Image (cartoon, rainbow, N blue to C red):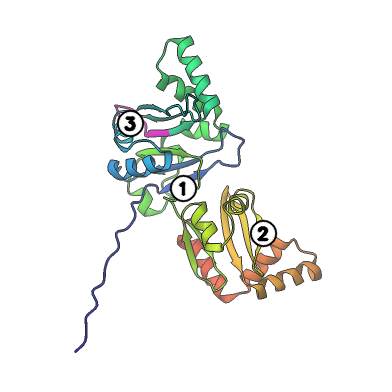
Amino acid sequence: MFKIKKKIEKPKPPVLYNVIEDYSEFDAPGNVTVCAMTMPEDVAAHAKILAESYEVPLEEMTSLLTDGGVYVYPQVSGLLTRGLFACQVDPSGATPKQTWVLDLMQFAEAEQLARARACSLAESAAEVFHRTLPDELKTKLEQKNLGLDYRTLDRAVAKGGDIKYMDFRKDWSPHFKRLCIMPDGRLIETGGLEEFAQLHQITVPQAKRLVEEGGTLEVGGEVLACQIVNGQPAVARFSAKNYTKAKELVVSKGLHLMDALSEVAYNDPGMMRSLQRKDLGGRL
C-alpha cells in the first residue's frame, strides 16, 4: 500500500506593491522608497502590514487607510520619542492614497505650522513632508501615475490601471522581497534586513551598511558583493573559489574588485543563468 501525501498549500503573502522607486540615497528626512500599487487595495492586508511596520494599533490603521488623518505616537514616560504616521486620502479619488511618517523634528515643525496657519495637523504634516522630498520625486508626484510610461511597464503591473496608493517607506520592509544570487546559482528571496542578515550569518548593522552603501563583505572565505543599480541594491554571494579568481584579476588586470567579481560572474554558467532570469523577471 502506498500512502498518498497531500500537498499542503501555504498561504501566499499579500502583494502590497508592484511599483517601487528608491530615493534612499538622499539625505534624511527626504530619503524614502516610494512603494506603489496599481491593483485594487486590500485594505485589511494593507492595514495589518502597516500596523506591524509602524507600531500603530490595527483598528487605528484601518480607520486611517479608510478616512485619512494622522496618528501621533504616544509619549513614553512623559516624553515624545516618535513623531506621527499620516495617511492622505482624496475623497474624489483623483489622486492616489499616500502614507508617510514624520520624525520628531518634522512633527514639531508641522505642529508650529498648524498653529500659525490655523489649519489641521494633517494638512501641515502633508506640507512639511512633501517639502523635504527630492526635487525629482516632487516633479513626479505632480504627474499622473508618477509620470510612468505604461507602454514600457510589465503587463501585470499595467493592467491594474492607475496607481491606487503610495507608501513612502524608509525601511527595508519584510513585505517586499529582494533577490540574492547564491554561489550555486540559486536566487534566494529575502524580506527585511534581519532575514537578509540571518541568511548570510552577518549582523544587521553589517547588512544595513552593505545594502545602503554597496561594496563587498567577506563571509567565511566567501564574499558578498552589492552594487547600487538605479538606487536599488543588487546582491550576489561568491564562493571562495570565485572570490580567489576575482582577486587574481585585480592583480593581473588592475581591475576594481567589483568589476573583477562581475567578470567572474559572467564567466560562471550557474551564476549567468541566474543573472539572465533576474534580468527577465527579477524583483531587485
Depth order, front residue of 63/21: 63
User: What quarter of the picture does the N terminus occupy?
Assistant: bottom left
Residue 107 placement (x, y as % from top left): 50, 24
Nearest to N terminus: mark 1 or mark 2: 1
- Label number found at residue 173: 1
Q: Measuring 43% from the left and 10% from the top, which residue is drawn there?
A: 118
Residue at image point 56% right, 37% down: 31
Q: Which amino acid does label 1 sit on?
A: Ser
Q: Which of the two discs, 3 and 1, labels the residue nearer the N terminus?
A: 3
Q: Residues within 10 Å of mark 2 (few under 14, many from 20)?
A: some
Between the residue at mark 1 and the residue at mark 2, the CA separation in whole angstroms equals: 22 Å
241 to 92, vertically: above or below: below
* Position in image of residue 235 (x %, y %): 57, 59
Q: Which of marks 3 and 2 is nearer the N terminus?
A: 3
**Magenta highlight range:** 89-99
* Residue that badge 2 annotates: 216
Dot 3: few (<14), some (14–19), or many (≥20) neighbours within 10 Å? Answer: many
Of 208 and 153, nearer the camera is 208
For disc 3, the marked residue is: 64
Q: Residue at x 52, y 35 (%)?
A: 137
* Residue placed most toward the observer, 59 or 229: 59
Whether residue 28 is situated above or below residue 192 in the rendered picture? above
Q: Distance between the residues labelled 3 and 1?
A: 20 Å
Dot 1 and dot 2 residues touching (CB under 8 Å): no
Q: In this view, does 14 lie above or below 81?
A: below
Q: Residue 224 carries which label?
A: none
User: Residue 125, image x and y in percent?
Assistant: 46, 23
